[in-house]
Amino acid sequence: MKSLRDKLWQRGELFRTIRDYFFLEEVVEVDTPIMSQFGNPDPALLNFKSCYTGPGKLHHCETYLITSPEYHMKRLLAAGSGSCYYLGKVFRDGELSHRHNPEFTMLEWYREGFDLEILMEEVYRLIRILSGKDLERESYSYQAAFQKFLGIDPFSMTLEALIEFIESKDLSLTFTPRDRDEALDLIVSHLLEPQFDRNSVTFLYHYPATQASLAKIVTDDDGNLVGKRFETYWQGLELANGYEELTESQEQRARFEAENSLRQQIGYDTVPIDQLLLESLDQLPFCSGVALGVDRLLMAIWGKEDIADVQAFGFEQS
C-alpha cells in the first residue's frame, strides 16, 4: 500500500510529466475560469450552481462550476491562442461512485491541424508515456465493435429491438431507456466495454450522429451519419473523450437548444447557452480536442478500484 507521501509525490510526478510533454510539443498551458455565467446543456450532466451577488453587470447572476474547460478553451483558440491544454479541476453534480467524484482532475487539450486519427495516436502515445508501459492499441468503429462483440448493428435497430436485446441479457435494470441513444449507452457500458482487452488501449470511434455533441458529423463508408468523436478505454475504465471539433456556430446553437429541450423533458433545469462561445465559433481553426480523466488514469496505472484511493481527499473527506 502506498503511503500518503508516496501517493502525493507520484501524483505530482504525473502532473510534471504531462506539463513536460506539452512544453516540448509547444502546446501552451491555459488557466480558464472554473465558474461561468453559462452552464453545460448536455442532458447527461448535472451542473453545480451558485449565484454572484456583488457589483457589476453580472450582479445576482446565476453561475455554474465548469463541467469542462471546453467552452473557454475554444474561445481562446478562436482568438488565436494556438494549440493549448488545461490541467485542473472540473465539477459534475450527481456523480459519486467508485469511478466518479463530483470534483475531479481533467487534462483537456486542443491541437490545431490535427484530425481525429492523429489525435487518437497522440492520446495513445501519452498514455504509454504516463503509464511507463509498452501498451498495445486496438481501434474499432462504433458499428464494427457492436457487430464484432455483440452481433448487432447499432445503426439499423429500432428502439424496441434494442430494448428487447437489453432485456435478453438480464441486466436487472430498474428503468426502460427513453430513446435509442440511452439504450445504446446502456449497451456500451454494460455489454460492450467489458469485452475490450483490459491490457490494451482501446479506441471506439465514429459514434451515431445523434451522439455527436460538439463534434463534426460526416457520412462513413457504409453510408451512416456519424459524429467524428472517440472514447478511450484501458484497464476497464473509460479514460478520454475526443472530437474533431465543429466550427459552425448555427449548427452548434441548434444542438445546444435541442439539448436544453431534452433536459426539460427529463425534468432537469435548462441552462443559459454560452453566447460568447457561439459568437467566436465561426473563427475556430480546424482542430481536434480531447478530455482525459487524470484520476481514472491513475486508477488504471496504480491498479486501484476506487477513485478516492488516488486523490488526496475523496468527496466524503472534503
Image: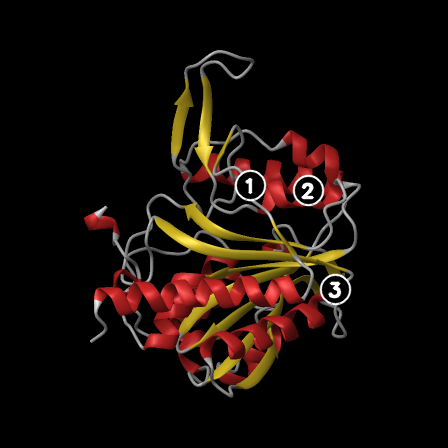
Residue ID for mark 2: 76
Q: How far across and down, in percent of the image, does residue 188 sit?
A: 46, 69
Label 2 CA crowd tier, 10 Å (few <14, some 14–19, many 20+): some
| Residue toward you, 218 or 236 | 236
Residue ID for mark 3: 114
Position of the N terminus, as image quadrant, is: bottom left
Q: In screen coordinates, is 32 left or right of 2? A: right
| Residue toward you, 262 or 26 | 26
At mark 1, the secondary structure is: loop
Question: If you read the primary sequence from the N terminus, does the residue marked by circle 1 or circle 3 appear first?
Answer: 1
Residue 253 has which mark? none
Q: In screen coordinates, is 250 left or right of 235? A: right
Residue ID for mark 1: 32
Three-letter amino acid code of the residue under disc 3: Phe
Q: In screen coordinates, is 160 left or right of 274? A: left
The Cα–Cα distance between marks 1 and 2, rounded to whole angstroms, is: 9 Å
Residue occupying image coordinates x 51% and y 88%: 134
Query: Which image quadrant for residue 123?
Result: bottom right
| Residue toward you, 64 or 186 | 64
At mark 2, the secondary structure is: helix
Q: How far across and down, in percent of the image, does residue 157 sit?
A: 56, 68
At mark 3, the secondary structure is: loop
Q: How far across and down, in percent of the image, does residue 291 sit?
A: 54, 58
| Residue toward you, 248 or 260 | 248
